[in-house]
Image (tube, rainbow, N blue to C red):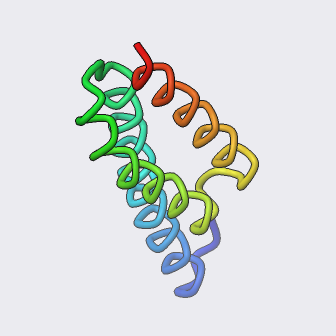
Amino acid sequence: MANHKATKKDVRQAAKRRERNRYYGKTTRNAIRDLRATTDKKAVDESMPDVISMIDKLAKRGIIHKNKAANLKSKLAKRANTVATA
């Protein structure tokens, strides 16, 4: 690392962004895990919009790719529909 003020600041900013991105990603993964584990139709219907919103925000921020977000939402919707019929 160069000993320039701007470079040191960039390192600090990158570390801050990395921590924030890790937090958002982990929180969303936990929400997805909890949604998949839920077998109650009402609980799934209530938490589904929140989880989809979290996934969209990750894609918007560039933490995950937009196609990955679409795949996650699609799989969650399929899972929600099977829970609804079961």
Q: Nearer the viewer, residue 30 or 2?
A: 30
Q: Is residue 39 above or below residue 8?
A: above
Number of callouts: 0
In this rendering, position of residue 18 left or right of residue 62 = left
Give the residue displayed 27% in from the left and 46% down from the top.
46
Q: Is residue 11 above or below residue 79?
A: below
Give the residue displayed 49% in from the left and 20% down from the top.
82
The single residue placed furthest to the right in the displayed view is 67
Residue 80, image x, y percentages: 46, 30
Q: Hey, which quadrant is residue 12 in on the image?
A: bottom left
Q: Is residue 2 above or below residue 41?
A: below
Residue 23, image x, y percentages: 36, 51
Tell me the quarter of the image containing the C terminus.
Answer: top left
Residue 3, image x, y percentages: 57, 76
Q: Nearer the viewer, residue 13 or 69?
A: 69
Q: Is residue 49 above or below residue 45?
A: below
Give the residue displayed 45% in from the left and 61% down from the top.
15
Q: Nearer the viewer, residue 75 or 86?
A: 86
The single residue placed furthest to the front in the displayed view is 85
Give the residue displayed 35% in from the left and 31% down from the top.
35
The single residue placed furthest to the bottom in the displayed view is 5
In this rendering, position of residue 65 left or right of residue 78 = right
Tell me the quarter of the image containing the N terminus.
Answer: bottom right
Residue 14, image x, y percentages: 52, 67
